[in-house]
Amino acid sequence: MLDGLLSFYVRVFEIAVSRHLDDRLAPLGFTGRKGTISSLLLIARHGGIRATTIATLLGIDKSITVKTVDELQHKKLVSRRSAVDDKRAQELFVTQKGADLADKLEKLIVAHSDEFFANLMTREEHDIVVDIFRRAFNRLREVEQ
Amino acid sequence: MLDGLLSFYVRVFEIAVSRHLDDRLAPLGFTGRKGTISSLLLIARHGGIRATTIATLLGIDKSITVKTVDELQHKKLVSRRSAVDDKRAQELFVTQKGADLADKLEKLIVAHSDEFFANLMTREEHDIVVDIFRRAFNRLREVEQ
DNA sequence: GAAATTAGGTGAATAATTCAACTAATTTTT
DNA sequence: AAAAATTAGTTGAATTATTCACCTAATTTC
């Protein structure tokens, strides 16, 4: 019944994978709302990215992004700089501390994701799913424009 | 960076697919917390299922399940009946009204899931992913026992 | 039969999300 | 070029969801 439903699996795995990541992160004392890590990594890799871009990329409300960035800035991981070409816009950059943490987190998260799914599917299956999802994700972002 | 991460895609698609379902459900005036629909469908298809089973299946806290069932019962969609073999346990059943709603919802959700992903991947890709996830899901539930 | 575990449940604390509203900057219209 | 509409970021309140510790009663385990 819920058996052939991709939406169901996406939900269930989201819950399970989040829990797994929390377990991995707990020893590091890292805390933060759900989109915090994704946001930090996005800023680390795309210096100058804007809050709105993060919001549309992750599919969340922009007010959440603002709160997330506030948090990251308060921890001195991220800085805001107003854009020269648009004084409304704030460009986001990681600090050195933020860059270091992003590197650490990225390694940890790649390991976590691989480990979590390694128990559940073969490497080939994993790569097939990633490939399909990657293209689907790109299409999703096009559609939502 | 987040690019090859299955955990990332699972999260992003969970957000997007939930939103899509909410849009589809809104006209029907159906409201309920996140696991409400999954719970109702599980009870409809597996009459006599217990709250704890739902909780472990969906990977959520049992207190959430209790609240969800309270809600469903209050709407006269579900009834509790204490099990003969274990007086602590409550077996869950749908009422006629619950069964009707479950049928309606199931059709709607299958349509929603198919429609959502049809825009993002081919039918073959969809079926490949479902197949992999189905087996992964079964393994996940084994592991968690 | 005592001790430990399990099912269901409660309620308070915490966290996350939504939403409407606001300012200031920018773009579009007229 | 002034007026109108839109956009980026932000705030705060209301709502919703989740976690957690704890409780009772029933059942197992020892």
Image: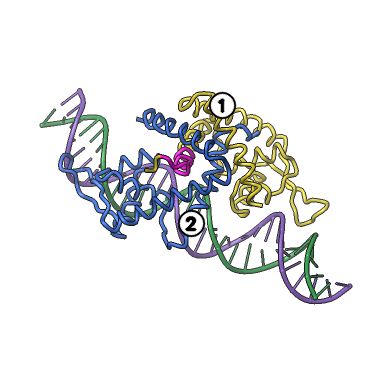
Chain colours: A yellow, B blue, C green, D purple
Q: Can you tell which mark lies on residue B121?
A: none
Going by the numbered disc 1, the residue's amino acid type is Ala
Spot occupied by residue D6 in the image (x, y as percentages of width and height): 71, 63
Q: Is residue B125 left or right of residue A120?
A: right
Query: Dot 2, how many residues are within 10 Å of its Cα: few (below 14), some (14-19), or many (20+)?
Result: some
* Residue name at image x 43 percent, y 53 percent: B108
Image mark 2: chain: B
Q: Is residue B89 left or right of residue B22?
A: left
* Residue name at image x 50 percent, y 35 percent: B129
Decide which of A29, D14 is in the foreground and name it: D14
Spot occupied by residue B84 in the image (x, y as percentages of width and height): 15, 43
Which portion, as a residue range, is magenta? Answer: A4-15
Which element is circle 1 on?
helix
Image mark 1: chain: A
Decide which of A64, B45 is in the foreground and name it: B45
In what quadrant of the picture does the N terminus of chain A appear? top left
In this figure, which residue is indicated by the disc labeled 2? B24
In this figure, which residue is indicated by the disc labeled 1? A111
How far apart are the alpha carbons under marks 2 and 1? 36 Å
Q: Is residue B98 left or right of residue D24?
A: right
Most common SS among magenta residues: helix
Decide which of A31, B129 is in the foreground and name it: B129
Q: Is residue B118 above or below residue C12?
A: above
Q: Is residue B135 above or below residue A89?
A: above
- Magenta stretch holds residue A133: no
